[in-house]
Image (cartoon, rainbow, N blue to C red):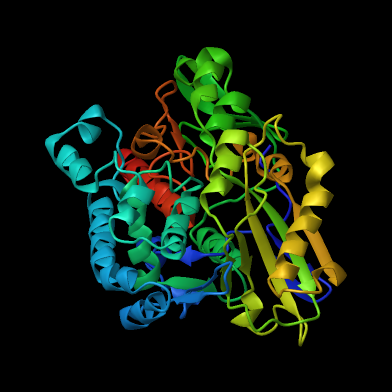
Amino acid sequence: MWAASSQQIRQAGYHFDRGPSTITMPDAFRSVFDHAGVAMENYVQLYELEPRTRNIFADGTVVDLSKNRGSMKEQIAAYSSEDALRYDAFMDESAALYAEANRHFLGKLLLKPSDKYNLQMLRSLLKVRPAVKLDKLLRRYFNHPHTLAMFGRYATYVGSSPYLSPSIFAMMGHVEAEVGVYGVKGGTYQLIEGMTRLACEKGVQILTGVEVHQIAIQNGRVTGVDTDRGFMEAKQVVANGDVLSVNRLLLAPEHRKRMSDARIAKYEPSISGFVTLAGVRRQYDQLLHHTVFFPEQYEPEFEHIFRNRSMPSDPTIYICYSGYSEAGMAPEGASNLFILVNAPYLSEAWNWEEQQTRYGEFVLERLEARGISGLKQSDVLIRYTPQHIEQDTLAHQGSIYGISSNSVKQTFMRPGNQSKDVQGLWYVGGTTHPGGGTPIVTLSGQLVGEQLAVELGK
């Protein structure tokens, strides 16, 4: 069931990762290797990017996100002296939000009501002001549309809108600028390769190409999984897939009374994505490892996506060009470009079979207008729609991050890591606690693994 097409592609001398591309919070990955008693560098190597990301606005203004606060204030002052004066105060609040989230939320399983509803958690929630939207918090510090868009974009890191999601995601300002943005030597998939090699060395048996038909349950408890290779007995099952899809596709209705089809339908899925992989025999002075091209107005993009469930008419376009940082990712003098536009989750409002080619050409034309020319003559040109994402990964309605964080409930009270319907069934990934994004889902797996080790007496 969970077999997917390759997440890394090598074609005509070009190397592409289908995603993710932006790596933050390296300690979330390092702790996996630390717990196993090995050095991460022997399995996967990260390198820090400085500048972190290039932000290019519609009027030609460029801000290279940097760990150097002086450089940031100088760049922001070029278009808004008032915003530059408030940058330090914003970054201090961003750091405080991250510390609060790290202390009380990201590093804990919230299994029992007492884990969620206690005085310490209440105090923590009050500190992060869950009812305040990210955009509203940003407007306490900044006035200029460039600054608001640059930091508002952090809501998309969890598949959400800056105009709907809670202000806690302002913590990403600190995470990116001061904790750092990283590349992975050999491409992002080397994280998977490194963890796989470590697991095998520790005696883990990994079966690929196995289709799971159903999670078997008897008397309200997991007994194993039915697969196309027969029945596999297990007293504990950890489902590393979308929680909503796991329930909908692998559990019989009588075993998921608290995750019924009606309940699943009430969750709002996150943003999806429309991806173009372009291998082109050109290089571009405008591009760093990470580059974002912003539209003239930022807010309409999210009205298109979440209200109309249609593609933006003037989208933000993100490009990852890993060949900027590492030779060998493309032929000499060429570029391997991962081009991403935010997309709505799948619905009847947008037909990808009809629109894929037209919208794909539209994205390349938008980039042509911004100086990234010649993409229609690429050696390699591959497109992935939300429909492909759903087919490959069974992500619910093609969402990338599970459910959105466009409300307090979906941010802080996500489906739990332990099934309320079935004993011995656990969930990890983006839809469950603590949330979406590569390092956060890595923490999700570690938290459940540590809990199982305690329960099994390991």
Q: Could you tell me how many numbered marks the image carries?
A: 0
Q: Is residue 101 above or below residue 419?
A: below
Q: Which quadrant would the N terminus be assigned to in this image? A: top right
Tell me the quarter of the picture where residue 372 sits: bottom right
The location of residue 399, given as percent across then percent down, is 59, 41
The location of residue 295, given as percent across then percent down, is 59, 60
Q: Is residue 368 left or right of residue 17?
A: right
Toward the viewer: 182 or 353? 353
Toward the viewer: 259 or 342? 342
Residue 241 visible: no
Residue reaching furthest to the left: 119
The residue at the point 34 percent across, 77 percent down is 73
The residue at the point 62 percent across, 77 percent down is 287
Q: Is residue 98 left or right of residue 15?
A: left
The location of residue 234, given as percent across then percent down, is 51, 33
Residue 9 visible: yes
Toward the viewer: 33 or 429? 429
